[in-house]
């Protein structure tokens, strides 16, 4: 879901992608570990929305997979 006047920003793909980037910081983690931290930070979110936000970040080239660890691309 994308932002509109009826949907809060934190419940959109963009908002959840921002939350993922904030959690990730400069470190690299596994998908499972990132999801566990994401569920604690955004307990109302679903796994589907996590996967969509993660896919979005891969698609725009912000994240990459290095030896089964997710990391920001410099």
Image (tube, rainbow, N blue to C red):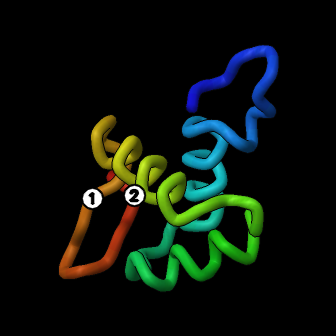
Q: Residue at x 43, y 48 (%)?
A: 52
Question: For the residue carrying disc 2, how many other residues have a C-alpha within 10 Å: few (<14), some (14-19), or many (20+)?
Answer: some
Residue contact between numbered discs 2 and 1, judged by CB atoms under 8 Å: yes
Q: Quadrant of residue 5?
A: top right
Q: Is residue 2 positioned above or below 53 on the image?
A: above
**Left/right of residue 21 with respect to residue 72 in the rendered view:** right
Q: Residue at x 51, y 58 (%)?
A: 50
Residue ID for mark 2: 72
**Left/right of residue 17 with respect to residue 40 in the rendered view:** left
User: CA separation, marks 2 and 1?
Assistant: 6 Å
Q: Secondary structure at mark 2?
A: strand
Residue ID for mark 1: 64
N-terminal-most mark, 2 or 1: 1
Q: Is residue 1 positioned above or below 71 on the image?
A: above
Q: Secondary structure at mark 1?
A: strand
Q: Is residue 1 positioned above or below 22 on the image?
A: above
């Amino acid at each position: 879901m994308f932002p509109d006047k009826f949907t809060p920003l934190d419940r959109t793909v963009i908002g959840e992608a921002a939350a993922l980037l904030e959690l990730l910081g400069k470190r690299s983690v596994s998908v499972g570990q990132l999801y566990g931290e994401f569920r604690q930070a955004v307990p109302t979110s679903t796994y589907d929305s996590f996967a969509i936000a993660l896919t979005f970040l891969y698609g725009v080239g912000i994240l990459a997979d290095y030896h089964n660890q997710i990391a920001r691309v410099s």
